[in-house]
Image (tube, coloured by chain):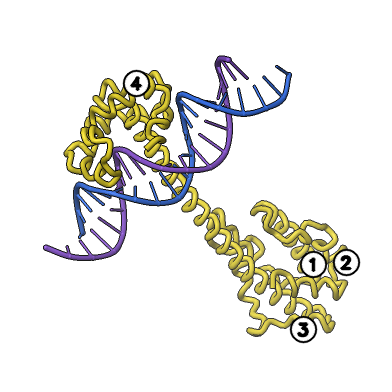
Chain colours: A yellow, B blue, C purple
Amino acid sequence: MPSEYREGGRESQVAGDDAKLETLPCLEAPQASNKKMKKSISNNNNRRFSDEQIKLLESIFESESKLEPRKKMQVARELGLQPRQVAIWFQNRRARWKSKQIEKDYKTLRANYDNLVSCFESLKNEKQSLLAQLQKLSEMMGLSSEDCRNSRDPEGGNTSTSSNYGNTNCETGAAGPGPENGRIGSSQDDVSIQMEHSAQQDHRELQGRGNYVDDSLESPETWYIFGSGGQFEQSSNSSYWLNFWS
DNA sequence: CGTGGCACCTGCGTTACATCA
DNA sequence: GTTGATGTAACGCAGGTGCCA
C-alpha cells in the first residue's frame, strides 16, 4: 500500500506513519490484506468520530475549509486523532459541502427556470389577447386585409381578454386590470393613441423582464408598427405578430 | 536557465462499514 | 432477520506545486 504512506503528507514524515500504525494494530501484520485491515478497523468501536470531535472539526471548518499543516497537527493533537485522519475529514467535509452547494444551486436555477416558463406562458396569453384586440380594432376601422383575416382568433376574438392586458409582470405577480382597460371603445383617434402608448409601455416592460425576448423586438421598426397615422400599415408587420413566439 | 526526480497536497471516485427504516 | 438507502471514514489514483541536484 505505497500510496498510503505517500498521501500522509508532510506531517506523515514527522509522525503520521508511526502514529497510524498505533491506531491500526492490524498493520502490525504486514501481510494483512486490505479487506482484513478494513475489517479490523470496523471491529474497532472508534470508527466514527465522537460528537465532541465532530463539533470541534465543524467549528474549525466553518472558519477555514482548508487547514494549514501546522494547524492540522495541532487539531489532531487536540482531538487525539492522526493528522491524516484530520486531513481526510476535511477532505470529505469539503466534498459534502460542495455537494450540498450544487444541490442548492440546482434548486435556485430550477426556480428561475420555472419562473421563466410561467412568464413565457403568460406572455403567450397576452399575445393571443392582443391579437384578438387587433383583429377587433381592425374590423372597427374598416380594415380587411388578408393578414388581418388570417390572424383571426380561433376562439372568436374576445375583447374581454383585454382584462389580462398589463397583468403579465411575472416578477411582481401583481393582479388587476391594466390602466388602459375599458377605454377601447372610444373614438378611432383615441384608439390609435392608446395603442401606441400601450405598445411603448409593453416594450418597456418586456425589456425589463430580461434578455430572453426575441431580438427582433428590440428594433423600433418592428415595434412602432402603428405609425403616426394610427393605421395598421404593413401587412408584413401583422404577419410578424402572427409568428411572434408561435 | 532548463530539467528530472522527489515529496507533498488536493480533488475525485470508490470502497467498506454502520445505521436506520 | 433481511434488505435497500444513506452517511461517513478511509483508500487509491491522478494532477499540480515547490524544492533541489
**Residue to which mark 4 is pinned:** A73
The residue carrying mark 3 is: A150
| Residue depicted at x 41% and y 32% | A7
Q: Amino acid at mark 3?
A: Asn
Counting residues from the N terminus, which is met first, the one under dot 4 or under dot 1? 4
Amino acid type indicated by mark 2: Gly
Q: Earlier in the sequence, mark 3 or mark 2?
A: 3
Q: Earlier in the sequence, mark 4 or mark 2?
A: 4
Which element is circle 1 on? helix
Amino acid found under the numbered disc labelled 1: Ser
Chain to which the residue tagged by mark 1 belongs = A
Image position, residue A41 (x, y; %): 22, 40
In the rendered image, which residue does mark 2 sit on?
A229
Q: CA distance from mark 4 to mark 2?
A: 82 Å
Q: Chain of mark 3?
A: A
Label 1: which residue? Answer: A192
Above or below residue A235? Residue A46 is: above
Residue at 50% x, 55% y is A111
